[in-house]
Amino acid sequence: VKTNVSLRSRRLEWPANLSSDDLIDLGWAPKPITQFILKVHSRCNLACDYCYIYEMGDSTWQSQPIAMSEDVTRQAALRIREHAKRYELDQVSIVLHGGEPLMLNAARLRSLLDILVGELEPDVSVDLAMQTNGTLLTSDRLDILLRHAVSIGISLDGDETTHDLHRKTRTGEGSYSQVVQGIERLLDSEAGFLFTGFLVAINNASNPSVVYESLAAFDPPAMDFLLPHGNWTALPPNHDPNKTLYGDWLVQLFDYWYDISALKPRIRFFESIMNKINGGESLTETIGLSESKLVVIETNGNYELVDVMKSAYSGAAATELNVFDDPLDSVAELPTVAVRQIGAAGLSAQCASCSLMDVCGGGYFPHRYKAGYGFQLPSVYCNDLQRIIEHIQSRIDLERNGGSSD
Amino acid sequence: MTQEALARRIGVSEVSLNAWVNGRAAPRKKALAVIDALYDESLLISNDGALAVERFDGKGLARLDSDQLDQLLRGGSDSKSIELIKISQQRELLTRLQRVIDLCPPNAQSAVELLEVAKNQSPDKWLNAISYPHVAVWLSACQASLQLNGCIEYDEIAYLRALAVSVAWQCEVTDFNQRLNDGLRKVVLPGLGYCAPGVLAEARRVGVVSRRGRLTLVIDGKKFPLPEHWDDAGEYWTPLRSINVTHSNLTLDLKIDDVDPYGATNTSYGAFSAARRYQLPESEADKWKDTIAQAWLYLVDNHFEFAREISESLSLLVPIYDTEIQHSCSYRDGFGAIVTTPDWGIAATAQVLVEEVQSMKLKALHHLVPLHDVTDPTPRYLPLWTSIPQSFEMVIEYFYASAAAAELWKARYESSFGEDKFDADLKLAWRNAWAEGLADQLIDCGHLTPAGKRMTAAVVQRASSLALQATPKARNFSRRRFIDRRICLRVQNVDYPEDVIERLKRAWLGGLPCPASVALQYSFRADVEPTFGWKRRDQLARIRTAHPKQFSILLEDPASIASLWPGVTLADVHQVNGSYDKAIELYLDAIEEKPDNCEAWAGLANACAQAGNRYSNSLGRFPEVVLRLYVELKQDGNIDVQPLELAEWLSPLLLQLDDSSMKVEADQR
């Protein structure tokens, strides 16, 4: 199986134009991949208008098989085991993704999980997880997910109005009520402890406290807020490079969240910034200079780069490599993967000289893209990131000095 | 027993009994209690006094002949009787477990099913796992919840879920999932250990999954793999620590449980309220191990029979916080577990093991043979050794254990020197006093069943056959100590209704004789431990006995008392020295100065009691009446009233009262 999209058909931009020697000169050395995102179904039952797979630059989904076959699943598992053995990994993380992974019916979901676990364990321990829109969390699927201890993250954008603005069904109606039903089924079931939290796409026109409270009502362990996908060529929605519309929204959310003294959901985006300010580690690849250690395996078995690269241009995530022909090492050696493992050496000159570089890390990799320049630019959210980081820094300083936010 | 007789015993009609049998109606709580008692009674099945218990697994009856039963009632045992106790405990536990399972709410069904899977998979391991002592304690909590609220509570269900995981793991059930209840800071798997990743503090939803026998804790979707075997420590897993020591082919195999939530000691399950140690540091656990190991050697070498009994019956040690004195207890339901403060030396630890195993055995005996009327659990008996009213069950438990305890003290007396020897002698005296003081009263109180009377006679026979008499010096010392303590207790804790005192006051002021017909019904504040007087005098008496020169300094130089013995008065010193007249004179001065000086009143009453003067029967036994009347009169401006004069005036009333009963009068109100 080979991808139809060839990198060679496109003029090589940074970092695809780097050779192995260039990478080694930049301090790169081979590192293991520990997280595998399996696109087990390439279609979705929703039609969110901001979706980077179906609604943005990439059109490769049209050529993908609808679901991952047993052969591809088995071969992917063998490649993962091979990779784990080489790097002596005790445990790997596999995330079921889509499209919508629960478009698989219960029988196929069971079969897929049985194959993955059967091929990998006991040699390699598998931490299974899933990112779903939540609408198809039916009791039979929940039983299977529980049986394999698949952690479940759900995409929910906030209150009903905010959520339904973008996350619509194929008939154009809001999906909120369907998602809520799914969440309630999950939380009421024996599998409730597998719920990891919400993935939230930020809408800067919404009220942050309303969004927060509507999510907190489900008592999630965590909320992962994502800046909408976009880059210097395809700007994010409601974005003005000269203003900090997203930064301001994040500041409001941070203050609201930070001032809650009771047990509250974790927000990894904020915690990462706080950790970095305090000299710790980032918890997410959207902040800091965390090494990228993940690869995507498409339904046809192709290896791809981090999924949201597709928001840059059609085929941006493609690699020409696949599970049948290529070991995972060959993905790890790709320049687009390697430059995300070399820290500040992979940043633009502007980022490298920025005082916030250690905390920000240049922002999320796909957000740095500009046609003709590749990915060696500051994030399209540079001003927003600066706004939120400096605000968090000031809050921390204030607290250290014994002041209050008021 | 015929159906008619059974209905009569339960106190219902035959029609009602038939309705229960046919499932048309269910018995009420009161009838259920009678049925339970009958069930217990039915275990004693033989006319010749032999005992038989049906094994839960259908392997026939475990029998004890009459001699073995007598041995058990006397305080001894053999392997067969310990086995019979264990079988009866398991039988009881399984009955109660089934009752709880039958009433479990739907949200606990997965745990119930998991227990069932484990039972089918490996019945022997299941029985062993479910026999963990705290399971029975948890069942008691479930039973209490059912009685109080009509349902099993959140915490009890949480325990059931954790128990199911623990049992399944031990039974090698390979694949299962179990949601655990929210809000936990530590996931405790009963009998195995605990897992406590840092994120648990903020956990919303916690569960456990097992795949191919490998257990993984899942906290809000995050996985924390545990070791393949529960005995192995892991990054997130801490197994219960074990003590395993063998000496002369006799093994003690104990677990230290410092995490199980049902290891909590409170008045429902233990003998006293005490904060338990939560998660002992490694160094303290090692210290425990070391002391228990040494105590084991001591026991095996010196008291082999006790050691054998402990080896066969004890499986769990629950540490509690250190206090000024050593505390220990066993659970009413949790056979195999004892609770104790840290060690106070090898011999003391050995003593704790022996005494608590005796108590544990007596508690288990209640399940085998009804020893007394169990329908009255009110703590209202005041035995010599305590100022806190005890239930009858506790009283006979102390009584049962006292012979064994005295035996150990006797051995310690014979092998000790100096002050240790005196202490052992004293303790032996106390134990003898308990046994002597209790035996007749136990029999007289009317609560004992025929088996209970047999037990009492057997214990007395054993104590006397062992010739466990303390020296006269220790006996005298302990008698004085008991008197002083009781006086302090009464002065501080006993109260009378206003109208009684008012009537006495009017009679006194009217120059009338004391009205002997006044009903002196008083109340007793059972929750207050006497905090003054007797302990200091007790310490002084020890000094006088062991270090006479040091004591004489106090007499020769009264000014030194305050610096050497803060809180002690010269009157105390004279009293301990036996100069009762001088002591009384000084106490009276103190009372004159401050009429409600409880310390002085207790000292005065004690000095009178010790002196055996004419006030000893009134003031010595009912000091609180004299005190209360005196204070009232003084407050009303009667400056001439004298304590001893008042005590004499009250004599006709007080002498007719009988305070010899152990019974605390609180319940007479």
Image (cartoon, rainbow, N blue to C red):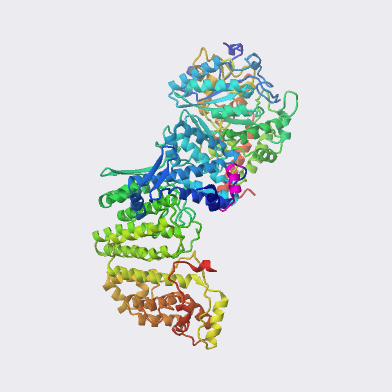
Task: Please indicate whether residue B225 sits to the left or right of residue A265 in the image.
Answer: left
| Image coords of residue B138 (percent x, y) | 50, 46
User: Is residue A402 something one can see in this rendering?
Assistant: no
State which quadrant residue B502 falls in. Answer: bottom right
| Image coords of residue B203 (percent x, y) | 55, 40
Above or below A282: residue B247 = below
- Decide which of A42, B325 is in the foreground and name it: B325
Q: Tell me what residue is drawn at x 54 percent, y 82 percent.
A: B505
| Image coords of residue B126 (percent x, y) | 45, 36
Above or below B132: residue B349 = below
State which quadrant residue A312 falls in. Answer: top right
Quadrant showing the N terminus of chain A? top right
- Decide which of B246, B44 is in the foreground and name it: B44
- Decide which of A226, B80 is in the foreground and name it: B80
Above or below A97: residue B284 = below
State which quadrant residue A257 falls in. Answer: top right
Above or below B231: residue A324 = above
Answer whether residue B604 is magenta in the image: no
**Span colored in magenta:** B11-23
User: Is residue A291 something one can see in this rendering?
Assistant: yes
Per the picture, the main secondary structure of the magenta-coloured stretch is helix
Q: How many marks?
A: 0
> Residue placed farthest to the right in the image?
A172
